[in-house]
Amino acid sequence: MSPSGVQKERMEPEDMYVLSDAGIVLSAPSAKPYPNKLPKCTDCAPLFMKAYQMRNAGAVIHSHGMESCLVTMLHPFAKEFRITHMEMIKGIQGHGYYDELVVPIIENTALESELTEALSEAIAAYPKATAVLVRNHGIYVWGDSWISAKTQAECYHYLFDAAIKLYQLGIDWTSPSHGPINSAKVHQGSERHVKGSITAAPTNGTHVAEPLRQCIVLDIEGTTTPISFVTDVLFPYARDNVRRHLMSTYDSKETKEDIGLLHAQVKDDLEKGILGSVPIPADDAGKEKVIDSLVTNVEAMIKADRKITALKQLQGHIWRTGYENNELQGVVFEDVPEALQKWHAKGIKVYIYSSGSREAQRLIFGNTVFGDLRKYLCGFFDTTVGNKRESRSYSEISQSVGVDKPSQILFVTDVYQEAVAAKAAGLEVMISVRPGNAPLPENHGFKTIKSFAEI
């Protein structure tokens, strides 16, 4: 860690403090002649330690960049900074262009060391975040290495600067369309309260606060898309094209990573005695033999309908080629595009949560007969946030989309167990009843819909 109050650009390696993983100073820099001050370890030390200990960071940067200060002042009561559909979001670890980037904001204190508890709580509450903003102060950014931390810091400051300029132009940086700030999204009817409700005026003249539904989270299979498209089109396409895909891309970096994941998965499957698993020979056995074994394992995984990362990642890459070659086209029910457009116009943020990979989700909605529907979507969640039948997964989503209460999220699914899990997390839930969906239990207790037009 650096000393406090020094000219950072003039520092040498020997000017740094070295600390243990418990925060104990192991070595300190020697004093320098006047007019240099006596060395003192940065007051940010306990905050840096939180990023190292809680996120296994390789490097942490604290910046007082003007953009990181001003962006926290645009909305004085906001607890988060949010932005989506901006290119530099891709520079933030674990995020892409279509994702919504969420950065928690904590309140400033007189002494930096007093921020430790608030920063720790923010890190714990936002597991996907790689930064925490401090209102009227600056930002803490961390990464796997100094290169990652520096790159992300530059991207964050770019995005903050963009948000400030868009604010000055009256443009909303938090929605995919980047429409006017004073559109229906901000002023839905009348006065809007800080906590996300609107004041309604009934005919009797009294005023009551009604909750504002801020987000809708949609399942894909059986909800936006026929189950048959996944089972009868996507899965068979991936199975039938595994060999062709591996043969044509075998030496690419992406496919090497896919094969590495498959190697690890198959090794684990063999140890557990999973039916259909066969050993993958070493590379010196030849490309054909390696691919033969990979195909056998993948076919067995698909047949068993296994929801594992190695399979989902490979399938996504195969499907991407299929869409690019016009051999595949995303399918959604006819009522879906109109509903997405309607919700988007009303300022309701819409997200997808599916067991398929985020790439597979984007491919479906980006290549439909109705055109690219991703412009109406704010983000994509897959099972990296958790199993869809566990309530904590929906709690995680509610933290990520930044509502004040989980009840401000509507979750639509065709699976009863998912509905139960979402309801337990406090979300509003509706069950989609579409052709080909599995029957629901009697007296299930959920509102059902046959079309998004009913929402």
Image (cartoon, rainbow, N blue to C red):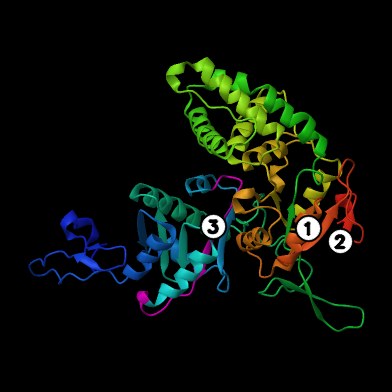
Badge 1 vs badge 2, beta-carbon distance below 8 Å: yes
Q: Quadrant of residue 214?
A: bottom right
Badge 2 vs badge 3, beta-carbon distance below 8 Å: no
Q: Residues within 10 Å of mark 1 (few under 14, many from 20)?
A: many
The residue type indicated by label 3 comes to: Ala
Residue 278 belongs to magenta span: no
Quarter of the image for the C terminus: give it.
bottom right
What's the magenta region?
A: 95-113
Horizontal placement of 393 versus 213: left or right? left
Which of the marked residues, 3 or 1, is nearer the chain's N terminus? 3
**Looking at the image, which residue is at 31% across and 63% down?**
21
Distance Cα–Cα, label 1 vs label 2: 8 Å
Question: Dot 1 corresponds to which residue?
Answer: 419
Nearer-the-camera pick, 48 or 198: 48
Which of the marked residues, 2 or 3, is nearer the chain's N terminus? 3
Quarter of the image for the N terminus: give it.
bottom left
262 relative to 81, above or below: above
Residue 96 belongs to magenta span: yes
Question: Dot 2 corresponds to which residue?
Answer: 446
The residue type indicated by label 1 comes to: Ala
Question: Dot 3 corresponds to which residue?
Answer: 163
**Looking at the image, which residue is at 38% across and 52% down?**
149
